[in-house]
Structure formats: structure tokens, C-alpha cells
Amino acid sequence: MAYQLRIPAILLLFGCLACDDDTGKNAGNTGICTDLDGLQTCWNTGNTNNQGILPVSVNVNSGAGAFLLTAFVTGDAYPSVEAIRSPEGSRELYWDDWYTSDYNLTAGILPLGNEMMINWPIRAEDPALSAGRYTVDVAVIDTEGYYQLGKSVTYYTQVKQDDSFSSGTVQARIVYVDDLGDNATITGATEDAVAIWRAIWSTYGLTLSVDYDTRPEVDAAIPSMTEGSEDISEISATGTDADITVIICDTVGGTTQIYGESGGIPGTLVEGRQSAVALSWITNAGGDGTFSTNDIQVYGETLAHEVGHYMGLFHPVDFNGNRAQYWDALSDTDECNTTAACDASLGENNMYPYPVCIGFNNCLDQQSLSTGQAGVLHRYTGAL
Ligand SMILES: [Zn+2]
């Protein structure tokens, strides 16, 4: 990934004589709010201050479990989280603690595109929410890494009034594009794969509720989810602000090498260009257009894996060649160092980066999650 540097605007343009203070008292209003689908969703727009930061307020009532912030910026400008501060003013997250780290906590700290999402808290070891006003400082930088002053940001905050992290229900909406919804081979295999996905999650206290829909006017080639598209925004807009959209298509990102791709780690529950998970039915069918029993198992595991990304899970390990390079920020997934060692200790984990196979069609089941990984899924704001 091409990570952006962040270069303080104040050092380059002018001295900071009258900057907004750092306590959050100037934080933006919560804006227009609705209580729908078990979530309080608020939206507003604001401009970054003379440090290139927009402090966004999130009002949290007692009994709330987590919140999700989605920020949209237009043009060559990239929003990312600078810091999260509690109602008491303590800084619970700071971008640079994770930016240069070998451990992945959230993509919300990375300026990767026009859309930014962060869910908080993420892990059991992160501080639980307390009632009051949280402040999320949203930084906006340009392609060179300079903070952008006076840049307009549209943002949505969503708070779930559910602080139980041992059980929850996720509402997924599976949408077939083009004419795929008319193909009984594809719809039948998808429903069988959903049963496998549901079984994987039920072990960890997550109930999966699925609706099906079709969008025949949308092309079956879906672009890379890191770019997204207006089609994806429109597909997501016809669902609710509590469901996760899963698009079944021919190809993702113009290749049959990609089984599926998530529009963020985490993804958003409101509509945007990246507000979905996309899965290629062709790749999941093994490329031959027919689904073997093994293919359907892989398809079900891919659904759980990609929606796992969408709900905030990273791969437990990512490699550079044969060597591990990055690990997730969870303490109970093995910190292995080589592909051989990681295949052995994590090859059955649902979030492992690739299938571990001994010969053709003889792959390990990848259906397990650690307690820490399940905790991330339960903390996602869309798990109610
Ligand atoms: Zn993955």
C-alpha cells in the first residue's frame, strides 16, 4: 500500500497563534440524527481547522457498545483518523502509534482514499465506551502528505445501543448483479455457501441473517473495492443503514484471481463508493463454472473471510515472500515468522491470507477464529 506521510500544515504556512485547542470543546456538532435499525445515525458536514483537522463529536449514551465513523472528502484529499479522545479527555487512539507499527489495528488511520471508516472500540483490550461525548479528530491530507486546511468533510456517526459482545446478529444483503440472480447454479451454490458461513459464525455467538436481492442493470465486472463506484453506492443505498451489502459478480478488479474484496477494514454501514463486499462467483467456483463440494466450502469460507474484513479483522499475518511482515493487533493469534510455521499454526484460521492445500482440491478447512478475532466481530457497530 502507498501510505501517505503527514506533514504539518502549520509549520509550512503560518505559526499557530490561534489554533483550536486540543480538548475537543470546538468539536463539530452531531448534526441531523435518526434512530433507525437499532442504531443512532447522525450526519453533518464541517471544515478542517487551521491544523488540517476536523474534530467530530460522537454522543454516547450509557449501554452503548461501539460507534462507527464514516468520513467522505472529494478531490485529491484523503481523510484519516488522527486521534480518538474519550469524554474524560484521555487519548485512546493515536494514529502514529500504529502507522509505523508491524501490527495492523485499523485502516482508519491510513489516508488511502476519499472515504475513511473507523469502528471504536475494536478489541477487548481497548477501553470500553463510557457515556458522554467522544471526539474523533479527522485529518485530511493531500497527495503530497500536507494537511489540508478548510477542507469540507461529510461525516456519519453511528452508535449501537448494545454492549453485549458475546452474542449478536449481523444483517447481510446479498445482491446479484447483471443476470446472475436468474442462474439457479449460482443462486443455489450461494445459498449453500451462506449455510457454511452461518455455521462458521454460529460457533462464536454471531447470528447471520441474510436477504437476497438483484440489480440486473449493474455490470457483472465490479471494479476494485479500494476504488469503488457509484453503482456500489446505489446498490448499498437501497438497503438499510444497519446491513452489510455483499455483491455477487463475475469478476472483482478485472481479474479472476480475486475471490472477493472488502470495501474497507472496517467498511461502512452507510452508502458510499466502497460500501460493500464483492465476491466473484467464477473464482469461487474454481474457474470452471461448476461448483464442487470443495468449491462451495471455499465460497462459504470466503464470504465469512471478506465480511470479517468488513467488520474490522485483518489477516492474522501478512507475508513478504516467505517471511512474515505484518501481524494483526490481537494477542491470541500466533506471531509466526515464516510461511511454513504460519501455515502450521494458523492455516485453519478463517482470516488466513490464502488457502493451505496439499495437492488439488485437498485444502484445510479455514473456519476457526480466535477469541480476540470473535471479539472484533462482536464490537463492529453492525453486529447488533
Ligand atoms: Zn483477506
Image (cartoon, helix red, strand yellow):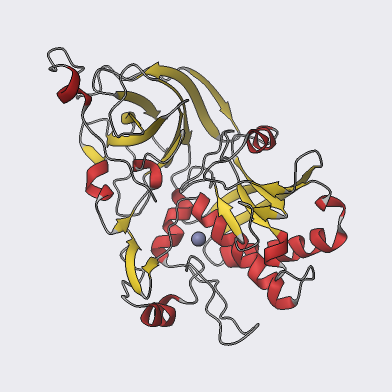
Quadrant of residue 200 in the image? bottom right
Position above or below: 68 against 12: below
Left or right of 202: which side holds 327?
left
Q: Residue at x 24, y 22 (%)?
A: 51
**Which image quarter holds the C terminus?**
top right
Asked whether residue 171 is in view, the answer is: yes
- Give the percent coordinates (x, y) of residue 136: 33, 31
Quadrant of residue 238 in the image? top right
- Give the percent coordinates (x, y) of residue 323: 33, 73
Position above or below: 133 against 358: above
- Give the percent coordinates (x, y) of residue 170: 59, 49
Name of the residue lying farthest toward the front: 144
Position above or below: 5 against 148: below
Question: Which of the pair 209/352 is nearer the observer?
Answer: 352
Left or right of 346: which side holds 127?
left
Left or right of 296: which side holds 155?
left
- Give the percent coordinates (x, y) of residue 103: 30, 58
Position above or below: 183 against 322: above
Q: Residue at x 42, y 20 (%)?
A: 30
Q: Residue at x 35, y 25 (%)?
A: 56
Name of the residue lying farthest toward the top: 18
Q: Residue at x 36, y 81 (%)?
A: 341
